[in-house]
Amino acid sequence: MLDIMELYSKPASYKFSIEELSFIKKHLKEKRHKYRIRYAFYNKKSFKGKQIAFIIDSNYNGRKSGVENNWEYFSEREISNIEFQEIVENFGTNKRRFEVWYYKNIEALIEDDKKYNIDTPVEFIKECKKRNYSGNYQTLMNFEEYEAAL
């Protein structure tokens, strides 16, 4: 008999079997509505680097956390099937409510969202560009120009 707490305690290097993954997915499925993807801006003015935040909030309906004061939420969406599958496969490795990735420019976040077949919210893209979080990110490699320069 499988025990969800025993699976949660496995080391990060442990690879779950198909049976264990199915059990975890079944257990998390009823809690899937609590996961929320949030697009935000980091509020700390003293931090001069990455200001765009991509956040997976695993307790969306819960009590507001003090750490949320660090972000200005701008857009949010439900978790995608691919993101949910990654949470299942990495069950127990994240012991925190929030998983956060920071970006210096919106183009890098757009490229990462495309890997998951997600369209980054248009209003968030516009706000990033308005706040000058754009550019300096190469999204295309032109080999013809590179070879011509040699």
Image (tube, grey):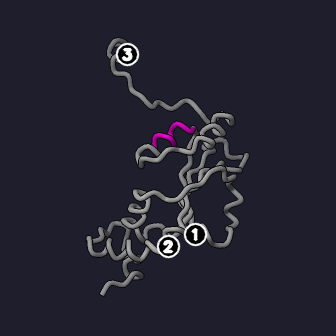
User: What residue sits right under mark 1 in the picture?
Assistant: 59
Rendered view: 83 above or below 133: below
The question of residue 108 being in magenta is answered with: yes
Q: Amino acid at mark 2?
A: Lys
Mark-to-mark CA distance, 3 and 1: 48 Å
Query: Label 2: which residue?
Result: 31
Residue 84: image x %, image y %? Answer: 43, 62
Type of the residue with mark 3? Glu
Which residues lie in the magenta part?
A: 106-112
Residue drawn at 55 percent across, 61 percent down = 36
Residue identifier under label 3: 145
Image: 15 above or below 56 = below
Label 1: which secondary element: loop
Q: Earlier in the sequence, mark 3 or mark 1?
A: 1
Q: Do tag 3 and tag 1 residues touch (Cβ < 8 Å)?
A: no
Q: Report the residue at 44% width, 73% height from top.
A: 28
Q: Which residue is situated farthest in the bottom direction here?
A: 1
Residue 145 versus residue 83: which sits nearer the camera? Answer: 83
Please state, as top left, top right, bottom left or bottom right, where the C terminus lies in the image: top left
State which quarter of the image contains the N terminus. Answer: bottom left
Label 1 is placed on what type of residue? Answer: Asn
Mark 2 or mark 1, whichever is nearer to me: 2
